[in-house]
Image (cartoon, rainbow, N blue to C red):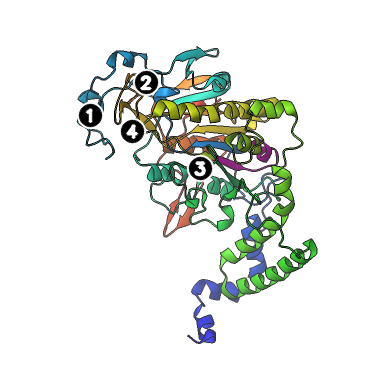
Amino acid sequence: MNPIREFNLVETRRHFFGRAAGGIGSAALASLLNGPVGHASNSASRVGGLPELPHFAPKAKRVIYLFMSGAPSQLDTWDYKPKMQDWYDKDLPDSVRNGQRITTMTSGQKRFPIAPSIFKFNQHGKHGAWVSELLPHTAGIVDDIAVLRTVNTEAINHDPAITYIQTGSQLPGRPSAGAWLSYGLGSLNENLPTFMVLHSTVNGGFGGQALYARLWGAGFLSTRHQGVSLRSNGDPVLYLSNPQGMSVQMRRRMLDELAELNRDRYEQVGDPEIRARIAQYEMAYRMQTSVPELTDISDEPAHVLDMYGPDVKKPGTFAANCLLARRMAERGVRFSQIFIRQWDQHGNLPKDIRRQCGIVDQPSAALVNDLKQRGMLDDTLVIWGGEFGRTIYCQGGLSKANYGRDHHPRCYSKWMAGGGVKPGIVYGETDDFSYNVIDKPLHLHDLNATILHCLGIDHERLTFRHQGRDFRLTDVHGKVVHDILV
C-alpha cells in the first residue's frame, strides 16, 4: 500500500474531532497523565487516579497480596476437622457431595475415600484459633489476622480460577485488581510503578502451573496501569541498565526527542496509548535509580533479616520477596503481589505441603510483624491465600502417611491482616468434611468488594466503560463483608 494513503486512512471520527478542537492535545495529555484538567487530587502526595476517589475515608493505603498459586489445602492448614479421623478410608457420602461438579482428574475414580489430615492442630491466640503445626510462625500472629474459612468460587481449574480471583472474570481480558487500583487511586510515588509483581522460586526454580502476564495486566485500561514484574537475576527489570556506551545524559536526550516524536504522533492520530507510552518511558528512566535502591537490602539491620529467615538474602525467594514487598510499601507502591507456585498437590501432599509451608510460614509472619513494628500495618492490607481449596477425599492411593487432594472450589481458607480488617477473628464455618459452607459464605466477589472498601472505594462505582457497558472488578456481583472489618 502507498504509505501516504495508508497514513490518511488512519483518520477516524475521534481523531477528526480531536484535531478540530484547537489546543486540545495538551489538555488531553494533562487529563491522561494526571486526571481531569482543573481538578486537584484528593491526596497531596498522589499522582494520577480519578478525582472522585477515594469515595470515603480509607483504612488502607496499599495492598500486599501473597498469592499461593496452585491452591493450598485448607484441611491441612486452617480448617480443622477432627471428626474426619473416624472416617479414614470411608467413602464421601453422596449427601455431602450432592452431585456437585468434580474435576476430570478424579471423576473416573471408583471411590472417593476420606483422607483426614495427618497434621496436628492446636489453638492459638486470645480466641483459640485452630492452626496446623505446619504454620508455627503464622500461629504466632493469629491475634493480628482474620482467618476466612468460607471463601468460595465457581472455577474448578487453575487458570480460570486464578484469572477469576485476580480480575473478576474467568475469561481473560479484564484488568487485574492492581490495575484497577492504579487506575482509580493513582500512585503514591513518582519513581516506582503503582503495581509491582514478584515471582518466588522454589528449590531454585518456579515449577507448578504457568502464570501469565495477563494476571497482572491492565486489560482494557491503559497499559500504564499493568503490573511491573521484578526479576530475581540480572537487572530487576529488563533493560533497566543503559547499554555500554550510553551515558545518562545521552539517555535523557534520547527520551526527550522520542517524547517529542510521540507528541507529534498523538496530535495526528489521537491514540491515548501514545501518551501512556511517554509516561512509561519516563517511569523507566526514573526506575534506573529507584529500583536498584529498592532491591539493595544492605541497609536492613540484622535483626530484621533474621525475622524473615535464612533465605532472605537469596534473590527471588519468597522470604526475599516479602522483605522487598515491605520496602515497596515504605516507598509508596500501591499494590504489590508475590506469587509462589507448587501448591497443586494431587499426590504426595504431606511431603510437598511441609516444604511449601516451610518456605512461606516464617516470611509471611515476619512481614506482618515488620509492618506492625513500623506502624504500617494499620494502613497496609496483607492478603494470603490461593485460588481454591482441596478435597477431603483422596486422589490416587491412600495410606495413613500419604495422600493427595483434588481441586475444591466450594470452600477454602485465606487470611487478611491490617488495613481495616478486624484482627484475631475466624470467619465462617464449613461442614465436618470441609466440603460445603454452612455459615457465612464469602464469595470471591465479596472478597474483592471488601478489599476495595478497605481502600475507600465503593466497588459499584469504580467502573470503566468498554464495548458499550460499564465494567468493574466485581462484575455485577459482590457485597462488602462488614463483619470482618473494624
Going by the numbered disc 2, the residue's amino acid type is Ala
For residue 388, side relative to residue 206 (left or right)? left
Given this view, does label 1 or label 4 mark the residue nearer the observer? 4
What element does badge 2 sit on?
A: loop
Q: Report x, y in % for residue 199.
A: 55, 43
Q: Which residue is mark 2?
A: 401
Q: What residue is rendered at 51% in x and 52% in y?
A: 217
The mark nearer the N terminus, 4 or 2, is 2
Q: Which residue is mark 1?
A: 98
Q: Nearer the viewer, residue 307 or 100?
A: 307
User: Residue 206, labelled with which disc?
Assistant: 3
Q: Residues within 10 Å of mark 3 (few under 14, many from 20)?
A: some
Q: Residues within 10 Å of mark 2 (few under 14, many from 20)?
A: few
Residue 327 covered by magenta stretch: yes
Going by the numbered disc 3, the residue's amino acid type is Phe
Please report contact status of discs 4 and 2: CB closer than 8 Å, yes or no. Answer: no
Given this view, does label 4 or label 3 mark the residue nearer the observer? 3
Going by the numbered disc 1, the residue's amino acid type is Asn
Q: Which residues are magenta?
A: 326-338
Q: Residues within 10 Å of mark 1 (few under 14, many from 20)?
A: few
Q: Which residue is mark 4?
A: 406
For residue 51, side relative to residue 202 (left or right)? right
* Residue 128 at least partly seen: no
What element does badge 1 sit on?
A: loop
Q: Nearer the viewer, residue 484 or 106?
A: 106
Please report contact status of discs 1 and 4: CB closer than 8 Å, yes or no. Answer: no
Going by the numbered disc 4, the residue's amino acid type is Asp
Against 238, residue 85 (above or below) is above
